[in-house]
Image: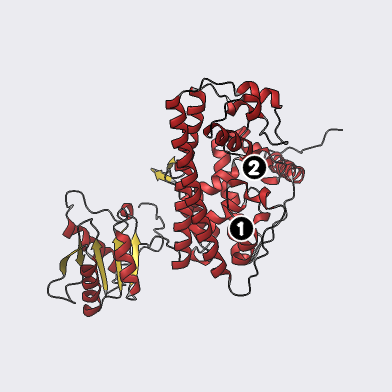
Amino acid sequence: MGEPISAGKRRARLKVINPRSAGIDVGSRFHVVAVPVELDPNPVRKFSSFTKDLIALAEWLLAVGISTIAMESTGIYWVPLYEILSGKGIDVFLVNARHAKNVPGRKTDINDAQWLQQLHSYGLVRASFRPDQKITELRSYLRQRDQLVRYRSSHQQHIQKALMLMNLQLHHVVRDISGLTGRRIIDAILSGERDPERLASLRDRRCKESAATIAAALEGNYQDDHLFSLKIAVELFDTYSEKIRACELAAQSLMTELAGSDYQDPGSQPGDWKICGHGFAFNPTHLIQALSGHNLLRLPGLGPTTVLTLISECGLDMKRWPSAQHFVSWLGLSPQNRISGGKVLSSRTRQDTTRAGSAFWMAAVPLGRTNTALGAFQRRLAARAGKSKALIATARKLAILYYKTLRDGLVYQDPGAAAYQEESRDRQIRGLQRRAIALGFQLVASA
């Protein structure tokens, strides 16, 4: 007789959990909707993607008594439909397409819609996370800002290329050509100034290089076509900078609204430039404190820019995830075990991490050079398992601290690298003692 194996809480037969559910196959030109045959004699219908047809789709679903819907998150085509259905009070499950694959060889729009409806009726699909409306709006502003920053960086490279074509080696003597000194010199060049001594006199007093060194770097071979390219690149750079600031001000206005009427804007502070070094037009520290109710900036590696990204991507309600383990799994920072034949075939993390997961990963990169407990943990693990795995593990620990701070009100106090190393040493000693006892030996400290 075979050995009994626990099958968990698997049901003996499938039970209908959502009898009034529908499934929608989302497309660019039309959507196919399937409802239970008990609710309508024509259970499958096709609607165009025009707004009036989407409204008719929602009204038909309400007329037949549908209360919940499952649809795949196909591109961006789902967004208008999702917003209209949610506005009508229908519970919409946004489903990852990989979690609702149909049987091979049966790929049609009608079959996909019916398959989604059937899975949803049995409660076999999980809704993807989507924050509430205000956080979604904040996310749109900050994502747009990130996109504009990437576009602007291309034009900064074009500026540097135009300068190098004229052998103006400004980037060798100035750390940031878009900074105060760099822009003074570039604007003067575009205004017609060619004297390297006069250009060097525009340097800020805090520049590391001397005026003589800067003047030597600015003896160039000026050409009209390269000056034209420089002018176009600078204008585009300034245009993107203006639009980036507009995104930041829109985000600031929305966060001030979310903070409530009790929030008082402290105004500009003398040290704001240290915090706003990433280009933010305002200091978000006080708004972050007012929104979250916790000092998230106490967590190692998390600066204002990263925390704003996390708030816009994850929201502030950590109860959407039952535990910290669910949270890090959603972020893509936990191992995805593949087990077959009693063997672990793979335990890699997902390749398609979320934007929030990437933010935690980026925050973990500089921690390895700090004197914090997480920094000591990363260095110890990197020596044993490699840099890549150490970064993922550090990002996971940081995400758990973030989760517990928002959900449980954790006030993090960093014990420091020395305390972590001492705790690690004690843990190793206890492990050696257990192994010695198991083998019939006694562990004795050296004199």
Q: Is residue 1 above or below residue 172?
A: below
Residue 214 image offset from top left, x and y in percent: 65, 25
Q: Nearer the viewer, mark 2 or mark 1?
A: 1
Q: Position of residue 2 (x, y in %)?
A: 36, 51
Quarter of the rendering containing residue 23 = bottom left
In screen coordinates, is 85 left or right of 447?
A: left
* Residue 387: % across, % down: 57, 35
Q: Amino acid at mark 2?
A: Leu
Is 39 or 261 nearer to us in this picture?
261
Which residue, as the protein is rendered here, is positioned at the far front?
192
Q: Quick check: can you spot residue 14?
A: no
Q: Residue furthest right?
A: 447
Q: Which mark is residue 284?
A: 1
Rendered residue at 59%/66% (across/down)? 291
Left or right of 156? Residue 1 is left
Callout 2: 10 Å neighbours few (<14), some, many (20+)? many
Is residue 359 in sight in this rendering?
yes
Quadrant of res 433: top right
Look at the numbered disc 2 and give the secondary structure of its residue. Answer: helix
* Viewer-side residue, 304 vs 386: 304
The disc placed on residue 367 is 2
